C-alpha cells in the first residue's frame, strides 16, 4: 500500500455535502462575528463539551466535490480512534480510521493510501480528549442565524495550511456541517443528517480491508 501523508486538513476534506455555496450563505448572513471575549470563551467551551460527549455516531453524509459533483453515504464514528465513510453504490470508495492509521481506498484507481491519524485532521475528531486550543486555534465565532454557530479553526503552528469551519445547531448542540479549505484554496464541505449518537456499531466497520484480489494495494 502506498503511504501518502496528506495535509493535516485533508483527511476530513475527503468527504463533503450539499453545495459549496451552502456554507457561504451562512457566512454572508446578516449576523456579525461574536467579539465579546467572555461569550466566545463560553461558546468554545460548549462546543468542546459537546464534541467530547460523543462516543459513537452514525449519520448520513452528502459530499460536494470541488468539481461540482455530489456524493453521499454513511458516516460512522467511534471515539477515540475510529471512523468510517462508506459511499453509496455505485461508488466503492471508502475511508477507514482503525485507531492508528487513516486508510483511503480509491476504487477507480484500484489502490489504497494511508497516513498516521496524528498527521491528519481526523486526529481532531478521534482524540480521547478534543481540544479547540493548543494544536488548533479558534479564529472566528459567528452566529449566522438564530440557533446556529460557526467556529473557524486553523493549525496553530501551520496557519497557512488552510482552515476548518464547524457549523453547529445550538438547541440541542449538534454538529451538522464542516468545511475544509486547504492551503491551495480547494474547498470540501460535508453536511450530516439523520444523526444518531450513542449507537452500537460493529467493530468490523473500522477494519481496513481492500477488495479481494487487491489486498497488497
Image (cartoon, rainbow, N blue to C red):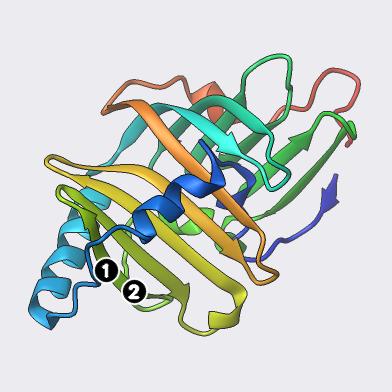
In the rendered view, tell whether residue 160 sits above or below residue 204: below
Marks 2 and 1 sit apart, C-alpha to C-alpha, by 8 Å
Query: Is residue 81 visible to the viewer in this orientation of the structure?
Result: no
**What residue is disc 2 on?**
138
* Horizontal side, residue 160 vs residue 59: left or right: right
Q: In the image as oriented, which residue stretches furthest toward the front? A: 30
* Horizontal side, residue 149 vs residue 111: left or right: left
Q: Are the two marked residues, 2 and 1, in contact with CB atoms closer than 8 angstroms?
A: yes
Q: Give residue 84's quadrant in the image.
A: top right
In the rendered view, tell whether residue 169 sits above or below residue 36: above
Numbered label attached to residue 171: none
**Residue depicted at 18% across the width and 55% down the height:** 49
**Horizontal and vertical percent position of residue 158:** 56, 82
Q: Nearer the viewer, residue 186 or 2?
A: 186
**Residue depicted at 26% across the width and 65% down the height:** 142
Q: Which quarter of the image is occupied by the C terminus?
A: top right
**Horizontal and vertical percent position of residue 54:** 27, 41
**What residue is disc 1 on?**
141
**Residue depicted at 30% across the width and 38% down the height:** 55
Tally of numbered tags:
2
* Horizontal side, residue 198 vs residue 189: left or right: left
In the rendered view, tell whether residue 1 sits above or below residue 75: below
**Residue depicted at 44% across the width and 59% down the height:** 124
Q: Which quarter of the image is occupied by the N terminus?
A: top right
Query: Is residue 125 visible to the viewer in this orientation of the structure?
Result: yes
**Horizontal and vertical percent position of residue 66:** 69, 48
Q: Nearer the viewer, residue 43 or 96?
A: 43
Badge 2 marks a residue whose secondary structure is: strand
Amino acid at each position: 500500500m502506498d503511504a501518502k501523508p496528506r495535509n493535516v486538513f485533508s483527511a476530513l476534506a475527503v468527504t463533503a455535502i450539499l453545495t459549496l455555496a451552502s456554507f457561504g450563505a451562512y457566512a454572508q448572513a446578516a449576523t456579525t462575528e461574536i467579539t465579546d471575549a467572555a461569550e466566545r470563551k463560553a461558546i468554545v467551551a460548549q462546543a468542546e463539551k459537546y464534541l467530547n460527549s460523543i462516543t459513537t455516531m452514525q449519520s448520513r453524509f452528502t459530499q460536494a466535490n470541488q468539481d461540482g459533483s455530489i456524493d453521499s453515504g454513511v458516516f460512522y464514528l467511534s471515539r477515540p480512534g475510529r471512523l468510517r465513510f462508506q459511499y453509496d453504490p455505485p461508488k466503492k470508495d471508502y475511508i477507514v480510521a482503525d485507531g492508528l492509521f487513516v486508510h483511503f481506498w480509491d476504487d477507480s484507481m484500484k489502490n489504497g493510501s494511508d497516513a498516521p491519524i496524528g498527521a491528519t485532521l481526523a486526529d481532531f475528531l478521534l482524540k480521547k480528549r478534543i481540544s479547540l486550543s493548543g494544536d488548533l486555534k479558534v479564529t472566528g465565532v459567528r452566529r449566522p442565524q438564530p440557533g446556529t454557530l460557526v467556529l473557524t479553526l486553523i493549525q496553530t503552528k501551520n496557519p497557512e495550511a488552510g482552515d476548518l469551519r464547524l457549523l453547529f445547531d445550538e438547541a440541542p448542540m449538534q454538529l451538522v456541517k464542516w468545511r475544509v479549505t486547504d492551503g491551495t484554496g480547494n474547498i470540501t464541505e460535508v453536511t450530516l443528517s439523520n444523526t444518531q449518537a450513542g449507537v452500537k456499531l460493529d467493530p468490523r466497520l473500522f477494519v481496513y480491508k481492500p477488495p479481494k484480489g487487491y489486498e497488497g494495494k
